């Protein structure tokens, strides 16, 4: 009996492609995505490069030497390099605020020693630690080299050999002193988050909201397949209602539910985690409405693409989890390599999360949301048209 | 049956429909009169559902025409003269009876007062007034069937298409559903129903159309179909008290007539006139020394006609 139960279970599994896919392929796919995110690539093990801008206010030999050392760092990617005009401190800060750079390194002189101010975006908590360490090292080495070269010059000016040994001894003795005195003053200044809730909270609020919005949308789309399976769709189409009206009705309904879903989520985030939703209502509403419209169209597209509810369930789980992993709903995108971040731009999640980040974290004016709104809106309309095209087969078969 | 008007309520002319290489309809032609109850029969895969879908506007015929009261059935408005009740319970189980009826009434274009009136009528017609605010998903199969039916007639269609309206319901519910259909028919609604319950079709319809392999193979009242296909002879079965030793011959003079097979407990034959021939057959069997324990007389039915016309071969 037990053997028969096992036998029929195996046979049923072999006949169910979706279940087979979910059992064996999806875990491998997810493992691969996370390995790519945290491994930095296929077996390369490289860490993602942090986008920085640098301003040399010190304009000294040491600062130039430190800047050169920083540019040689693999972990940093300097943007705005090769431009004609030198960046100012304020311009660098604006680049960080707008999200174009993760950090700005300002080198300045403090009590004749080279010091640094790191203008950081606190939403990327890893970057500030990495850049701080790298800048510390670069300044220390540059200062040390500078002092050693000065000592060497003094040494060459001395006249007797015993002096060499003494000076060497002094130099050796001072070298400890040099290290201590060279400990640079590196200050991390958060240019974004003063007085704000933890940035990770607003990021995850939007990340999770978008992921569940997509699940909700495919669930809503699944109702269409359910109606088809129990012939309610046939009955509906035999009335005065057209397929256009049916799809538009479902699209609007699912979008309204999506807006409410995200609204409730952010309201909770405001009450419990101090995310300032009401203070950013215009941007929030724009992003939420457009994201909900796009996600609903995506749900309808998937539903019209599939033949059965079971098929839709399998496909939606695979797609949504993949999009969420790549798009930043599960893991912050700043942890990903540049290549993965580029792949992430093919997902709803990435564009929606970028938009919400601009609203809640960067506090940019709503005009700055134009790229995100445009991409989400165009993709929503495209998915809706595709769904309509695919639904033709249900009307006249 | 009401045949008030000679123009058919629905006329289907040379309808053809193919799915790839499969010819589902190969030129179907028949008509439905006003108030007529027509049973549209056929084995599985004969083309019944395809025809119903063409009539309901859910499939487009490759060839042929459909006329509604003499006018070509083309526009959505014209299609609203048709009510469609699918085989499945095509309702929202998580809505109440009233909400389902309201929804489908609105989808059919009913507004405010008209909708209110029809809603009241539908609840009374289905006998579900006391369950108007209960979720349909909690109903028995028979109750769901009644709501399913009511949703298809909220807009008072002239023609009602029913695909297996009584599948999976108990005899009481079936009886109720047919009583509801009789009411509609009496009010002038033409009914076209598909069913595999041949006894139901025989009892509850004015005319039978049988389709097989995409073609109409029979069209007419049941008596006519019987006469044309299997004839009017009755099948007589005599149960005897011991196995037959040899066939019973109806005397030397008759020569050709012989009844029964050796070793069997039953003698069966077909006779034209029961009152005339049955007593003489019983007498003949008794004279041969056999006792008769039971006599069965079977009239030719739609069942016999159906199998005679469509054969015994399985279709799926």
Image (cartoon, coloured by chain):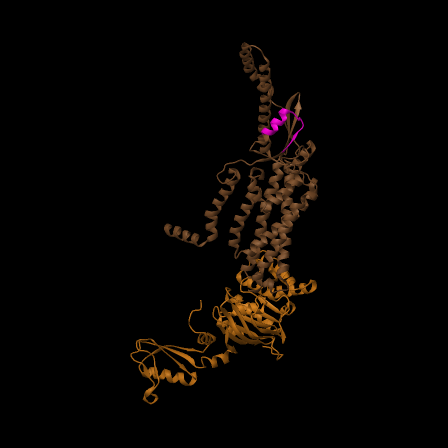
Residue A378 image point, x, y percent: 64, 51
- Residue farthest to the bottom, as pictured: B253
State the residue in front, B149 or B67.
Answer: B67
Where B124 sits versus A132, above or below? below
Residue drawn at x 49%, y 47% as measured from the top left: A26
Please say whether residue B134 is visible from this viewpoint: no
On screen, residue A360 above or below A390: above
Q: Which residues are magenta?
A: A53-69
In which image quadrant can residue B258 be found?
Answer: bottom left
The colour chain A appears in is brown
* Chain the render paints orange: B
What residue lies at 70% left-to-right and 40% top-to-bottom?
Answer: A279
Residue B178 falls within the magenta-colored stretch: no
Q: Quadrant of residue A203?
A: top right
Return the residue nearer the eye: B139 or A52. A52
Locate residue A169 relative to residue A64 in the image: left or right. Answer: left
| Quarter residue A236 falls in | bottom right
Q: Nearer the viewer, residue B108 or B79?
A: B79
Q: Position of residue A202 (x, y in %)?
A: 63, 39
Is A61 within the magenta?
A: yes
């Amino acid at each position: 009996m037990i053997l028969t139960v096992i036998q029929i279970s195996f046979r049923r599994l072999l006949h169910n492609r979706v279940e087979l896919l979910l059992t064996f392929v999806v875990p491998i796919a997810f493992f691969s995505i996370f390995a790519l995110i945290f491994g930095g690539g296929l077996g390369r093990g490289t860490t993602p490069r942090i986008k920085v801008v640098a301003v040399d206010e010190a304009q000294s030999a040491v600062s130039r030497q430190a800047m050169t050392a920083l540019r040689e760092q693999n972990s940093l990617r300097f943007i705005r390099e090769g431009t004609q005009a030198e960046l100012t401190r304020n311009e660098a800060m604006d680049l960080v605020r707008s999200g174009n750079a993760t950090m700005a390194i300002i080198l300045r002189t403090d009590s004749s020693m080279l010091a640094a101010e790191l203008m950081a975006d606190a939403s990327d908590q890893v970057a500030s630690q990495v850049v701080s360490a790298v800048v510390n090292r670069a300044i220390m080495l540059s200062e040390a080299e500078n002092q050693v070269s000065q000592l060497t010059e003094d040494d060459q000016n001395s006249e007797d050999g015993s002096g060499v040994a003494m000076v060497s001894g002094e130099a050796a003795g001072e070298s400890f002193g040099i290290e201590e005195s060279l400990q640079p003053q590196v200050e991390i200044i958060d240019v974004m988050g003063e007085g704000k809730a933890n940035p990770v909270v607003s990021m995850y609020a939007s990340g999770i909201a978008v992921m569940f919005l997509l699940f909700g949308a495919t669930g809503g789309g699944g109702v269409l397949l359910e109606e088809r399976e129990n012939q309610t769709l046939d009955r509906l189409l035999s009335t005065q209602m057209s397929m256009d009206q049916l799809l538009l009705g479902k699209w609007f309904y699912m979008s309204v539910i999506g807006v409410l879903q995200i609204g409730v989520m952010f309201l909770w985030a405001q009450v419990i985690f101090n995310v300032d939703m009401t203070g950013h209502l215009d941007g929030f509403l724009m992003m939420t409405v457009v994201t909900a419209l796009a996600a609903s169209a995506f749900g309808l597209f998937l539903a019209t693409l599939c033949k059965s509810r079971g098929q839709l369930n399998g496909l939606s789980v695979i797609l949504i989890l993949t999009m969420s992993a790549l798009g930043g709903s599960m893991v912050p995108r700043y942890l990903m390599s540049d290549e993965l971040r580029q792949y992430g731009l093919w997902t709803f999640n990435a564009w929606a999360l970028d938009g919400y980040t601009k609203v809640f974290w960067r506090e940019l004016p709503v005009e700055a949301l134009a790229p995100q709104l445009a991409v989400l809106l165009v993709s929503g309309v495209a998915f809706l048209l595709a769904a309509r095209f695919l639904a033709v087969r249900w009307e006249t078969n | 049956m009401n045949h008030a008007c000679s123009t058919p309520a629905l006329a289907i002319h040379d309808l053809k429909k193919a799915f790839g290489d499969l010819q589902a309809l190969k030129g179907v032609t028949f008509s439905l009169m006003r108030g007529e109850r027509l049973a549209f029969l056929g084995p599985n895969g004969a083309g019944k559902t395809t025809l119903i879908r063409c009539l309901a506007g859910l499939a487009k015929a490759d060839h042929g025409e459909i006329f509604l009261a003499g006018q070509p059935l083309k526009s959505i408005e014209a299609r609203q003269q048709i009510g469609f009740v699918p085989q499945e319970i095509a309702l929202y189980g998580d809505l109440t009876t009233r909400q389902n009826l309201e929804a489908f009434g609105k989808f059919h274009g009913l507004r405010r007062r008209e909708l209110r009136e029809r809603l009241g009528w539908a609840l009374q017609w289905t006998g579900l007034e006391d369950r108007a605010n209960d979720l349909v998903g909690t109903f028995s199969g028979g109750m769901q069937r009644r709501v399913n039916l009511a949703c298809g007639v909220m807009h008072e269609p002239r023609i009602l298409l029913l695909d297996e309206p009584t599948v999976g319901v108990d005899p009481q519910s079936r009886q109720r559903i047919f009583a509801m259909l009789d009411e509609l028919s009496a009010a002038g609604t033409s009914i076209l129903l598909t069913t595999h319950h041949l006894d139901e079709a025989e009892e509850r319809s004015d005319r039978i159309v049988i389709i097989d392999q995409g073609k109409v193979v029979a069209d007419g009242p049941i008596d006519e179909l019987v006469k044309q296909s299997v004839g009017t002879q009755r099948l007589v079965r005599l149960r005897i008290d011991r196995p037959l030793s040899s066939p019973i011959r109806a005397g030397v003079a008759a020569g050709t007539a012989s009844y029964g097979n050796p070793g069997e407990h039953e003698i069966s034959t077909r006779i034209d006139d029961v009152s005339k021939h049955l007593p003489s057959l019983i007498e003949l069997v008794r004279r041969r020394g056999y006792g008769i324990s039971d006599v069965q007389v079977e009239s030719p039915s739609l069942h016999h006609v159906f199998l005679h016309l469509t054969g015994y071969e399985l279709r799926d």
